Structure formats: C-alpha cells, structure tokens
Amino acid sequence: MRVLYVATDQRVPGRDGGSVHVGSVAAGLAALGHEVHVAASAGDGPFPRDGASWIDLPPPLGARRLRWLRGPRVRALAERIEPDVVIERYYNFGGEGIYAARSVGALAVLEVNAPVIDHPGSRKRRLDRALLVEPMRRWRDWQCRRADLFVTPQADILPPWAPRDRIV
C-alpha cells in the first residue's frame, strides 16, 4: 500500500516523543512492506534511513499554528505520490493531510494521540468561546468529520459524536 504520512510540525530526527513516534510509525509501516512517504520537518541531522521516503516540509516560519497553510503543498505532494491512504498526525491547527486525502480520493486516517476535545475550564476552550464562533472547535470538527478512520489509543479523547466503528 502507498502511504503518505503527514506530520509537518514534527522535527525528525528529534528527541521529543512526537518525533520518536513519527519515526517509529514510518519505520514500522515500511518494515511491513508499505511504500511510505513522510512529510515532516528536518530535525537534528539527516532523516532516518528506514525504508521510508522523507520529505522536508516544515510549517510556515516554523510555526506549528500555521501548519494548515501547507494544504496546497501537501495536496501537490499527494497528487504526485498518488497514495492509497493519507495518515495525518492530528494537531488542532493541522488538517492539511485530511484535505489532501479528500482531494486525491485516498483513505483519510487521522492519528490522534492527544485529546481533540477541550477539557472544561481549559485556557484553549475559554479563548475559543470568547471568540464567539469557536473557530478552533469548528476547525478540529472539520478535520474529524472528514476522516475515514481514527487511529487512537483512547476513544474518549475524540469528540463524542465520532463514529465508534471508525476508530481503530
């Protein structure tokens, strides 16, 4: 299977959990025989030589919150690669992988490792509600509604309306 894994805000190689996770997922999928292409930010050294094809695609100005602006670049990458599946590592300001998957007719998989939902009283939730139209909630809901599948260690970190039969 041809896979495009989108994690543009993760620096690989790196020392934090997200970086290690992205590298491990890419290597694991390649070891299973999949053709894996990873869009990530170049980290402290060369990309791993693990059977995956690595593409340096950092968020604009290195700012994670601008990651969604990479939508056209990720879409062009997907058009060139023609993936069967696009896996996006969820980030509230992401969505470029889901957008690309929809654009090329690939299966859209949202990998969720941290809560999509805002916990009551959180700073992010207060800010979002203060903006009246809740743009952050609406954007993450857009991402989740367009995902064909969710890969997550815990279903309760997804919105309660997320279809349970699409969670693996």
Image: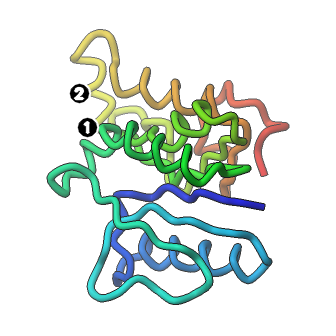
Instruction: Give how far across and how far down residue 94 sits, in percent.
Output: 40, 42
Instruction: Give how far across and how far down residue 61 sits, in percent.
Output: 15, 53
Q: The residue under label 1 is which amino acid type?
A: Arg
Q: The residue under label 2 is which amino acid type?
A: Leu
| Residue indicated by mark 2 | 127
Residue 89 vertical position relative to residue 45 in the rendered view, above or below: above
Q: Secondary structure at mark 2?
A: helix
| Residue indicated by mark 1 | 123
- Using a 10 Å C-alpha cutoff, classify the residue at mark 1 as few (fewer than 14 neighbours), some (14 to 19) or many (20 or more): few
The residue at the point 33 percent across, 67 percent down is 41
Residue 41 vertical position relative to residue 31 in the rendered view, above or below: above
Residue 63 vertical position relative to residue 40 in the rendered view, above or below: above
Instruction: Give how far across and how far down residue 117 sits, in percent.
Output: 49, 36
Which residue is farthest top?
132
* Applied colour scheme: rainbow
Q: Secondary structure at mark 1?
A: helix
Left or right: 44 with respect to 94?
left
The residue at the point 59 percent across, 54 percent down is 81
- Using a 10 Å C-alpha cutoff, classify the residue at mark 2 as few (fewer than 14 neighbours), some (14 to 19) or many (20 or more): few
Alpha-carbon span between mark 1 and mark 2: 6 Å
Quadrant of the rendered structure where residue 14 is?
A: bottom left
Quadrant of the rendered structure where residue 102 is?
A: top right
